[in-house]
Amino acid sequence: MTAAPRNSARIIVTGGTFDKRYDAIKGELTFSETHLPALLEQARVTLRLALDIRLLIDSLQMTDAHRQEVLLACRESPESAIVVVHGTDTMAETAQVVGRAALDKAVVFTGAMVPYSVQGSDAPFNLGFALAASLTLPAGAYVAMNARIFPWDDVMKDRKEGMFKRK
Amino acid sequence: MTAAPRNSARIIVTGGTFDKRYDAIKGELTFSETHLPALLEQARVTLRLALDIRLLIDSLQMTDAHRQEVLLACRESPESAIVVVHGTDTMAETAQVVGRAALDKAVVFTGAMVPYSVQGSDAPFNLGFALAASLTLPAGAYVAMNARIFPWDDVMKDRKEGMFKRK
Amino acid sequence: MTAAPRNSARIIVTGGTFDKRYDAIKGELTFSETHLPALLEQARVTLRLALDIRLLIDSLQMTDAHRQEVLLACRESPESAIVVVHGTDTMAETAQVVGRAALDKAVVFTGAMVPYSVQGSDAPFNLGFALAASLTLPAGAYVAMNARIFPWDDVMKDRKEGMFKRK
Amino acid sequence: MTAAPRNSARIIVTGGTFDKRYDAIKGELTFSETHLPALLEQARVTLRLALDIRLLIDSLQMTDAHRQEVLLACRESPESAIVVVHGTDTMAETAQVVGRAALDKAVVFTGAMVPYSVQGSDAPFNLGFALAASLTLPAGAYVAMNARIFPWDDVMKDRKEGMFKRK
């Protein structure tokens, strides 16, 4: 590859474990607002970056309509490097919807197994990993988890191990 | 680019702010041991990864001999995706030494402006970012900081702003 | 009071939000093991301290039999300064059981509204607060939350506000 | 003691390791502003509490004039429960100045061996511990560190071990 890395990117937020927060009154993890702005400040990002907060839901709640909305957000993105922050449980499914559309953009799905707000979260590492992948990979849809890059048509979550792997 | 991302990587540790720890007795930040194993566990990494702890020094202490040692470590690496964790102050200088050697590997330098052991560190994000870059970029030497990828011959640290930029 | 503070203490662990951990596979907060040893090391404690791990349950699951077990643990404690780490929902109820027994010991109940393992937890502050209270208060049973000390017979949790107050 | 715990307190901030922050540009720990408001919010404090930010210095920089200022702040405090957040190196010395004044208040000195902003800090625990001590101890001056309460005239810092002990 001789092409230079893309020099701007878009992050599309859909929710997932990545963005869950502890609600001290309810005593459980819920959604209130995304941690992305805090995380990007912490990462001292100077890349030109658009933040597109679409959904804030558990990926088990994600419907076909939601997936079409994610696809539309990718399709309409002026940036050709896209990271989709997504719950892990149905991440591969949404990646398939975007992958089949064969957009001329690199769309990289990532998420977290441990919320950003919990000690020992994989969220900051995963976001950094996915963002670099979106800047450098050829057009296509990918899942980036566990420091690995999977093509959209050959990835599944091993729920028992909590890891992603090829099918 | 039609080539698939590389499927294994090497992390060469040299120290830098990334790995500083607070010494409660001395009351200052010093080096004792690298945080890389903890960070990789937290990131739930399943990529095949070699960890090569070469140095644990401040990059202002880095000599030409040290830089040759980093170059040698890159040259001898069986993996062609390499991340070098390095202090930010002279990161660009070491990247030049490796860049001029024109190895047939992607060598990506990264570090942190805030130590991993301090709240709000950029270390996990940066490591994830650099690792994905090393898996996907064409052979060459790069600096990956602030969510940007710089070629080795066009990068400098703006010490006043604490950010990397093109020359 | 002219008596010196007590110079040793016992911490009786029963579980509660204080000790919940995020289970990445299940995607929820559960109990696996207590954080007390880690917390005490972090606090650099040199006080003579016995750690008595009795239960690791949600306080909504706590039965009369569990409460009798806590009372027995207090009664048999060789230390007369006792902290009971307890879920907040029924903390006042267990404090009543111990308070009515009128032991010749200072028994201080505390817990957390946010788990120790979650960012922004009140657990370390609360444990320190309760421990000092147990060393200095006259014999009796107390609830120590929100930086306040409540007698066992005049305290309730305001579940809506997530705060403790007098009845 | 039959008297109830005091029901309000004052925290006098003087700086020390407790309040040091990492300056990413300078690459060292410095003072910018106190973490006390953040810490008290995290601790979900409902106690009536006055926060009196006097100094933000390293305790090795503390002069006799500074100590007189701390004493004056204690003397003029309307609250009779006082916590002084202080650097550990000369904490015992300032405690002596306040102790000799024999105020009719409980003044409890505390600090931290690891800054609040660094992972594994003892700051939240120590603040909670000192605050409860200030509410419950008889009038006098004390050092509260390592989960122990020392009278002002029988305490020293063991600098080699990083612990406080009786003389």
Image (spheres, coloured by chain):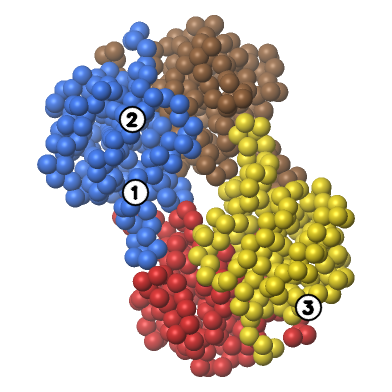
Chain colours: A red, B yellow, C blue, D brown
Q: What residue is pinned by disc 3?
A: B104
Numbered mark located on residue C50 in the image: 2
Q: Residue at x 78, y 69 (%)?
A: B75
Residue A151 or residue A24, whichever sits in front: A151
- Residue A55's place in the image compared with A77, above or below, is above
Q: In this view, does C101 lie above or below C23?
A: above
Check chain identity for marks 3 and 1: say if they share one. Answer: no
Contact, mark 2 vs mark 3 (Cβ under 8 Å): no
Image mark 3: chain: B
Identify the residue position indicated by label 1 in the image: C33
| CB atoms of marks 3 and 1 within 8 Å | no
Amino acid on which the number 3 mark rests in the picture: Asp
Numbered disc 1: secondary structure: loop
* Local SS, label 3: loop
Q: Position of residue D51 (x, y in %)?
A: 51, 30
Q: What amino acid is found at the position of numbered circle 2 in the picture?
A: Ala
Q: Residues within 10 Å of mark 2 (few under 14, many from 20)?
A: some
In the image, is C55 to the left or to the right of A42? left
